[in-house]
Image (cartoon, rainbow, N blue to C red):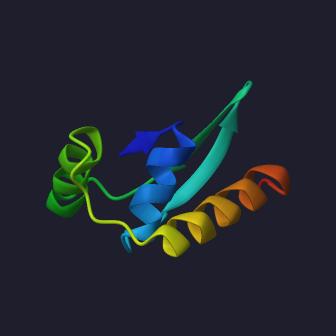
Amino acid sequence: MNTKDMNYAAYLLANNRKLESCYPDGRKFWFVFPDDEEVKLLTQKYYLNTGPINPQDFVNAQKILKNLVRNFQPA
């Protein structure tokens, strides 16, 4: 499952979903997560604003993703 929404990606990361990869595409930056049932369930909860989240975990996940974007080095 690919997303360019950093807040959504941080939400998934904060809920212990594994970030499989990330890559730039022009001016956009994509985050890749597994396309499994847990991600689908978390996606529903995210968009319905009913998902569980620990605020500190969310902030830490945002920091991780921002650092990935700023310091991206192609493999």
- Using the image, determine if residue 70 lies above or below residue 47: below
Q: Nearer the viewer, residue 74 or 61?
A: 61
x and y, in percent, of residue 33 in the image: 40, 56
Residue visible at 69% across and 63% down? 63
Residue visible at 51% across and 73% down? 57
Residue visible at 38% across and 74% down? 16
Q: Quadrant of residue 15?
A: bottom left
Q: Is residue 72 left or right of residue 46?
A: right
- Using the image, determine if residue 68 lies above or below residue 27: below
Q: Is residue 54 left or right of residue 50?
A: right
x and y, in percent, of residue 1 in the image: 35, 46
Q: How many marks?
A: 0
Q: Quadrant of residue 29?
A: top right
- Using the image, determine if residue 5 lies above or below residue 53: above
Question: Can residue 61 be seen from the camera position used here?
Answer: yes
x and y, in percent, of residue 20 in the image: 48, 63
Q: Is residue 25 left or right of residue 9?
A: right
Q: Nearer the viewer, residue 34 or 17?
A: 17
Residue visible at 83% across and 51% down? 70
Question: Can residue 75 be seen from the camera position used here?
Answer: no
- Using the image, determine if residue 26 lies above or below residue 5: above
Could you tell me which quadrant the C terminus lies in?
Answer: bottom right
x and y, in percent, of residue 9 in the image: 48, 51
Q: Is residue 64 left or right of residue 35?
A: right
